[in-house]
Image (tube, rainbow, N blue to C red):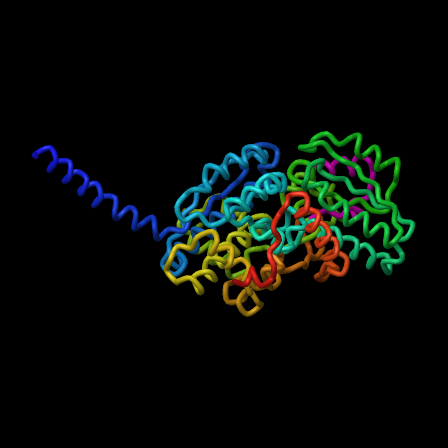
Amino acid sequence: MKLRTLLTAGLMAGAALAAPAAFAQAKEQFFPLLSYRTGPYAPNGTPWANGKQDYLKMINARDGGINGVKLTWEECETGYATDRGVECYERLKGRPGVTLFDPQATGITFALTDKVANDKIPLITLGYGLSIAQDGLTFPWNFPFMGSYWTAADILVQHLGKKEGGLDKLKGKKIALVYHDSPFGKEPIPLLQERARMHGFDLSLIPVTAPGVEQKAAWLQVRQQRPDFVMLWGWGVMNSTALKEAQATGYPREKMYGVWWAGAEPDVKDVGEGAKGYNALALNGYGTQPKVVQDILKNVHDKGQGTGPKDEVGSVLYTRGVIIQMIGVEAVRRAQERYGKGKVMTPEQVRWGLENLNLDQKKLDAMGFGGVLRPISTSCTDHMGSTWARVHTWNGSKWDFSSDWYQADEQIIKPMVKQGAEKYAQDKKVQVRTAAQCQS
């Protein structure tokens, strides 16, 4: 009898101790953060990861979380390797209060796309990932916010056409794509091939073996072909190496145009004057002037709680990390409007929030994101929400915007997305949602 009493008391005491912990856990929204702070892509992956963490810290410090729900997170180092990214996903997906994943790599995105459909956990792939995932009916768990590699390639062709006096003036021109030989680098090729067919320019494809530290063979091809323009689809060390090789080869940097992952400070700062005139897409604004950046400095860095160095705050990739995390936070906030303020949202509820975002200019201004990005409006059929970008040019010491905003031509892209999504659904035997189903 005494033994039974002791066991009962012990169990009751254990339950009493567990109850506050369970309650605290129930009020925490967990953000798994896949990152790479090591390896050849670390100079670019680190500020991106720091921006994401600092935004979460700022929301907790300034707002006390989302309607009283505290935000928690854990980083998992992938080194940009697909297998390690999948391991991180498997380890973190079961955590209580898990929200969504930002794989931070196109290869990892490809590997996780089937998994998240089974696990019912959203993927945010802002400005990267699978281009056909814009179709939310076929890809209910993928969200390529703000643009894909098809929209990026399309905008670059539009810009080159404008510089030449019209898209018809591209006929007979030579455009070389120097690309990272990976899913990321190959993704824009179908769009460029379609544009080449439409406008009559000659497209040459020059792959660079990852990570891109050896490019002499690639730039020998550039020297032999003498293209009118070079598009650079690089990431990490590949970008600065390409600019150095272009300089050594004598290829004019002003004729080079990078994707938005080849247009940040780490890509050019080591090349300096040698990169002067180089152009790249800018997916977002940057700098320390926006109110959201000032709020991060005030609530996080001024208190000694910054994730990285203070002088990095407001840089191109840091700001992109902030934007990504803001979208995740706002998806939770939007979901709470439907499922209950002050509650922890499930991944399926967060998916609804991601599909029903309406970040108009008034909302962005109020959040401190004025001038940082254009409005985003999603639906269950459109998981991208915005297809705008502009060009900026390196002046030898800093980036300067050198074009107005361009919008990708949806008349070209949407049929390609539809065709690609239909093929994916057929190959994978995916049950495609109807518009009525995804509104429920």
Viewer-proximal residue, 9 or 440?
Answer: 440
Magenta stretch: includes residue 229: no
**What percent of the width, then of the height, locates residue 352?**
51, 58
In the depicted view, which residue is nearer to us: 345 or 201?
345
- Kindly identify the residue that appears in the image at 67 percent across and 50 percent down: 132
* Residue 239 position (above or below residue 166): above
Look at 78% across and 56% down and name the residue there.
159
Position above or below: 55 against 179 = below
Q: Is residue 80 left or right of residue 333?
A: right
Q: Is residue 4 left or right of residue 85?
A: left
- Is residue 245 rendered magenta in the image? yes
In this orientation, does residue 203 appear? yes
Q: Position of residue 96 (x, y in %)?
A: 39, 46
Image quadrant holding the N terminus, namely top left
Q: Residue at x 34, y 48 (%)?
A: 25
Q: Which residues are magenta?
A: 241-259
Residue sitting farthest toward the left: 2
Choose top left, top right, bottom left or bottom right for residue 414: bottom right
Position of residue 421 measured from the top left corner of the image (x, y, whole percent): 68, 50
In the orientation shown, which residue stands out farthest toward the bottom? Answer: 362
Task: Judge from the rendering whether residue 303 lies leftward or rightward of residue 112; answer left or right.
Answer: left
Q: Which residue is found at the position 52% from the left and 41% from the top? A: 34
